[in-house]
Image: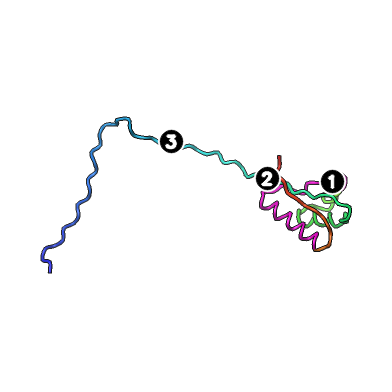
């Protein structure tokens, strides 16, 4: 058995600081400029088989456009070969494209929809 009481360990002493010899390094904090996320436009492509009324319905349902605006977008798609339905972040645009393609597939139409970066 130990009869001595344990001694407390001594705290390490800090080395004595001397005058700056120029060998130390100073880091500066730089602020980063965060850029907004890149936007993507969802485009519908024209085909000769999908009914215009179905395109208007899809634009109203998935892009929250009123009937008049949806009809104008549909006519632009019909006349120019493609038309912008909306501009979103990358993930939202990809989801919109998937929703349109799924709805077209379920209805048996060959409607095509893509997303591309806004320039």
Check residue 39 in the rendering and tell me which mark sits there, or answer none: 2
Instruction: Give the camera-side residue of 32 and 50.
Output: 50
Q: Position of residue 63 (x, y in %)?
A: 76, 53
Query: Answer yes or no: do the residues labelled 1 and 2 have beta carbons within 8 Å?
Result: no
What's the residue at 29%, 30% (across, down)?
21
Residue beneath the point at 16% across and 58% down: 7
Q: Residue furthest bottom?
A: 1
| Residue 14 belongs to the span the image colors magenta | no
Residue numbers of the magenta segment: 78-105
Indicate whether 78 appears above or below 98: above
Tell me: 85 left or right of 1: right
How far from the left and from the top, in percent, is residue 43? 77, 48
**Residue at (10%, 66%) from the top-left corner?**
3
| Horizontal relation, residue 3 to residue 19: left or right | left
Could you tell which of marks 3 and 1 lies nearer the N-terminus? 3
- The Cα atoms of the two marked residues, 2 and 3, are separated by 33 Å
Disc 3 versus disc 1: distance between alpha carbons? 54 Å
Q: Looking at the rendered structure, which numbered label has been put on residue 91?
A: none
| Within-10-Å neighbours for mark 3: few <14, some 14–19, many 20+ | few
Q: What is the crowding at mark 2: few (fewer than 14 residues within 10 Å), some, or many (at least 20)?
A: some
Residue at the spot of label 3: 28
Disc 1 and disc 2: Cα gap in Å? Answer: 22 Å
> Mark 1 highlights which residue?
81
Q: Residue furthest top?
A: 22
| Mark 1 Cα-neighbour bin, 10 Å: few <14, some 14–19, many ≥20 | few
Whether pointer 3 and pointer 1 mark residues with C-beta atoms closer than 8 Å, the reply is no
Element carrying mark 1? loop
Corner quadrant of residue 25: top left
User: Up-down: is 107 above or below 24?
Assistant: below
Upstream in sequence: badge 1 or badge 2: 2
Hey, which quadrant is residue 57 in on the image?
A: bottom right
């Amino acid at each position: 058995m130990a009869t001595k009481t344990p001694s407390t360990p001594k705290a390490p002493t800090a080395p004595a600081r001397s005058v700056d010899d120029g060998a130390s390094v100073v880091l500066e904090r730089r602020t980063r400029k965060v850029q907004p996320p890149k936007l993507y436009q969802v485009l519908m492509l024209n085909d000769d088989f999908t009914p215009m009324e179905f395109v208007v319905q899809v634009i109203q349902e998935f892009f929250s456009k009123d009937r008049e605006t949806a009809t104008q977008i549909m006519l632009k798609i019909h006349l120019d070969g493609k038309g912008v339905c909306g501009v979103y972040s990358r993930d939202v645009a990809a989801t919109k494209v998937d929703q349109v393609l799924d709805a077209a597939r379920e209805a048996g139409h060959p409607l095509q929809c893509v997303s591309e970066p806004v320039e």
